[in-house]
Every structure is written in structure tokens, then in C-alpha cells.
Image: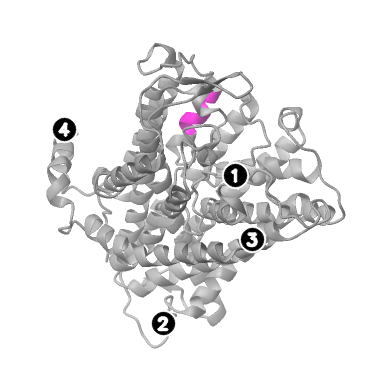
Amino acid sequence: MENLEVLQVILFFAFLIGLTPLLGNYMSKVFSGEKHLLLPVFGWSEKLIYKVASVNPDEETNWKTYTFSLLIFNALGLVMVFSLQLIQSVLPLNPAQLSNVSWHSALNTAISFMTNTNWQGYSGETTLSYFVQMIGLTVQNFVSAATGIAVLLVLIKGISRRSSATLGNFWVDLTRSTLYVLLPLSIVFSIVLVGQGVVQNLNIYETAQTLQGAEQVIPMGPAASQIAIKQLGTNGGGFFNANSAHPFENPTPFSNFLEMLAILLVPAALTYTYGKMVGSVRQGWTIFSVMLILLLVGLGISLYAEYATNPVFGQLSSMEGKETRFGITNSVLWSTSTTAASNGSVNAMHDSLSPLSGMVAMINIVLGEVIFGGVGAGLYGMIIFVILTVFIAGLMVGRSPEYLGKRVEAFEVQMAILAVLAPSMVILLFTALASVTNAGVSSLNNAGPHGFSEIFYAYSSAAGNNGSAFAGLNANTTFYNLTLGLGMLIGRFGVIIPVLAIAGNMAGKKITPASAGTFHTDNWLFAGLLIATILIVGGLTFFPALSFGPIIEHLLMNKGITF
């Protein structure tokens, strides 16, 4: 690594740490209903939305009603995006005259964007019109991210409230998350991206002549507005097929730095928001520290693996699948960040990563997308592990486990285990199915352990609602569209529903004052236990699968064998 690259990595994490309390404090005011910076600007819009939607913002609901509202809203979003793709050819803003999308690809895409996964089995510039990209996908980028924040807010209320039967109002949480957080950040970021050269227009595709005399079609479109929210909302995906490796999505080193920072910005800040809203900023910083440590360890391993020499490449570091304008460090920092944050955008092809670096990306996902994770989703996923850690620690010291004054009992542990098992089941069972059927293996680009890694990564990305891909697998088939779509649904709502149930159960409990025997959850001892729990659960569940894929591929590559 060059000194300039080292400095960039340091600056990246310095900005991330520095912006966390600033944005986190602002969001705590927004979600607590306090006066804040943008209330005079958008307050009238919030009131208008409630009036048009016939929502009483002062009416709170229990967790079951909250869950029902959330599920109905997301189901309507799925139907809308699915329908738009099926009638795309007759809709406006389709200058390339793109045809309707096949039903199975349309269903997969609708599920993908509704679940904040943004997995794409298609090429954006040759499949979806401007209208579908804007009205369908971009809208879902906002509301799917806001749904994740809403679930987190319910969990916060469940933990912090004393003997309460209600947990807020889904429509209020959804509106405030979108109106005061995601929308203003996206507007500012879109303007910055346009200034860096990201395209934002409704022009027809341009045709240029290459030096060899051939014609090249250059896609246009409203890319900057979608890229801003895809990064800030940890959605991922790409307006163009090459994603953030495309110069129209990510044209400069500065845009690359900002887009990487945007991936982690809101998930990191939400840890501070969490600490403020539960009444202990130290709790938020403890969780932030755990996330940061896991991210830094993964980044270190990935950088080592990508810069290390091996018999296949001789003394050269691997630049396969990477943009020369970004280089190895920026590619690895992005791959680590995007898989840690449930974002899914890429500026290099993960299929070309070294086996160990590719394994880090897989581990980031299969651990539950809790290393910052998706907006809201990463933090409530981490709280699941906090509950398990508190329960295990309670067993070790012979005390009734408590978290922030609330007793952790059988119901919370059962729901936490269900939330961990649901995506794990999808990953392992569907990977096994695809590995032994013609429909699964016929789409592979590589044989051997690398081909297995392509399948394993795809279902990990789907169940983890990440959306990135190894890029060596043709997933736009009926088999993969349907199984990956089902995996996304289970990975999203198989976690959300148990989390909401935990919140509802904990809200009704009394808060026990801290005593000399209280097990503290805001120190380095607990942070270490939490890290151990996360790694042990992930290691025990997925080590055999990782052994079949990247681990054995790494050992064989050191012998000069590739696939």
C-alpha cells in the first residue's frame, strides 16, 4: 500500500467516527419528536402527509398492529414494482423502447427492492426504463430503508419504555425517517454527485463511434438521484450494470470516497441515536466499537490477501476485476464496507477477489449483516446478538439475565434464536439445493470450490438482504429468481417479525434499577463477549460451507491450481 492509500483509509474512518455523534444526535431529536433543524422546513409536509393519509400521529399501536401496518405497506410496494415492470413498454420515459420484463425477473426485482436487498439479476441500462427506475426502484429505496429504521425505533421503545402496551405509530416513524433523514441527505448528496460528473438527465441514449470505427451506445438517465439513496439507504444495486464501477455512477476518486462513506454513515450514526434514546450514550458507543472492530479486522485480512503474492500471479498483486482508476485499496475498502453494511453496491467484481478476501465478504454477510448492517436492520440485528450474549452471560454467573433493566426471559431468547436461524436456514438449504440440481449448476461460470462460492454467496446475499453478487453466476433464470426471491423474503421478515415480537414483550416489563450485582453491558468486557458470541454463532453455522468454498480454494491456489 502507498502512503496516500493508508492516509485515505485513516481519513475514511476518522470521518465516519466524527460524523456519527453529529448525525446520531440529530436523528434522536427527529425520532423523539423534539424540535430539530429541519422541522421548520419540512414540518408542513409532515402534517400534510398525515392529513392526506388520514393518519392520527398521536395514536399509538401495539406491536401486532404495528407489524400488520408494516407488512401491508411493504406488500403494496411489492405489487406496485412488480406491476410496473410487466407494463413497462406502454409507460412514459422509456426512450430506449425497452420491452416488458419477464414475470419471474419482475417478481425477483420487486421482492429485492421491497426488502432493501437490491439484488439485480438483470442489466439496468438494457432492462428497466427511466420511469420504472424512478417511480418503482428509487421510491422503494427510500421506503424500504425507512422501514428498517421504523423497526429499530420500535425495538428502542420496547427496551426503554416502562410497562407500556404501545410502541408508537408505523406511519409516523416511516414518514419522519424519510422526510427528515433520508430525503434531505439524498438531495444534498445528489447535487454533490452531479457536480462530480454523475449523470442526471432524461435524455435518449447517445451513440458514439469508437477508434476502431464501431458504434457504441452510451446510456443516459437519472442516475445521481438513485445512487444517492442507494448508498445512504444501504440499498445497493446499480443504475447501470457495472454498478459503482461505471464512470457514470462513480466518476472520480472523490465521488468514490463519498459513496463509500455514505454506505456506513447512517448505520453508524444510528448507534449513537440508540444510545441517546435508551438513556445511555455509552451503550451506543459500545455497540459502535464492536461493529468497528469487526470491520477493521475484516478489512485487514482482505487487504493482506489482495496484496499478497501467490504462485498464480507471481510477484504481482491481483488487479483482475478492479478499476485501475481506483486500485486495490479502494476496491477492498469498498467490498468490505458494502458487505458489512448490507449495501450491495460494488466498484470491483467480487468474483475476482482472492479467496480469503471473498471469504471476508461472505462472513460479513452471513454473520447477520450486523457489522453496521443495513439502515436500522444492522442495529436491530446486533441487538439480537446482545440479547443472546446477555442470556449466556447470565447463565455463566448464575444471575437472571437483564438488559437495560429489562429481564431477558425465554420468549426473548426464543425469538432471538428464530431471527438467527431464519436466514441461516435459507443460506444453507438453498445452497445445497442449487449445488446438486442442473438448474443450479448450469448457471455457474466456474467449477470446483469457486463455483460453490458463487452459489453460496448468492444465497447469503439474498438472505442477508445485501444484494451484492460474485458476478460469476447467471442468476436471471426462473430457478434463481424464485429461490433467491423467497430467500430475500425470509431473510427480511423472518428477522423483522421476531424483533417486533421482542419489542412488544419487553415494552410491558418493569425496569429494574441497577445494583451492585448488575451485569454491565457498556464496557469492554461485554464488547468482547458480544464479539465472541457473533463469531461463534457464525463460525459454528457456516464454517463447513466456507471450507468447501473459499478456504479450500485458497489452499489450492497456493499450489497453483485455479478454477
Q: Residue at x 67, y 46 (%)?
A: 428
Identify the disc placed on residue 52.
4
SS label for mark 2: loop
- Residue 214 lies left or right of residue 111; in this view the side is right
Comes first in the chain, label 3 or label 2: 3
Q: Residue at x 41, y 82 (%)?
A: 518
Comes first in the chain, label 3 or label 4: 4
**Vertical position of residue 163 compared to residue 145: above or below:** below
Q: Residues within 10 Å of mark 2 (few under 14, many from 20)?
A: some
Q: Quadrant of the C terminus?
A: top right
Q: How many marks?
A: 4
Distance CA(mark 3)–CA(mark 4): 52 Å
Distance CA(mark 4)–CA(mark 1): 48 Å
Q: Main secondary structure of the magenta part?
A: helix
**Vertical position of residue 33 compared to residue 493: above or below:** below
Comes first in the chain, label 1 or label 3: 3
The residue carrying mark 1 is 323
Comes first in the chain, label 2 or label 1: 1
Find the magenta span and give its range. 105-111
Mark 2 vs mark 4: give the one in front. 4
The image shows residue 244 at horizontal and vertical percentages of 51, 41
Q: Is the C-beta separation of discs 3 and 2 under 8 Å?
A: no
Q: What's under tag 1, amino acid-wise?
A: Glu
The residue furthest top is 90
Q: What's under tag 3, amino acid-wise?
A: Leu
SS label for mark 3: helix
Mark 1 vs mark 3: give the one in front. 1
Q: Which of 72 and 336 lies nearest the eye of the viewer? A: 336
The residue carrying mark 3 is 303
The residue carrying mark 2 is 518
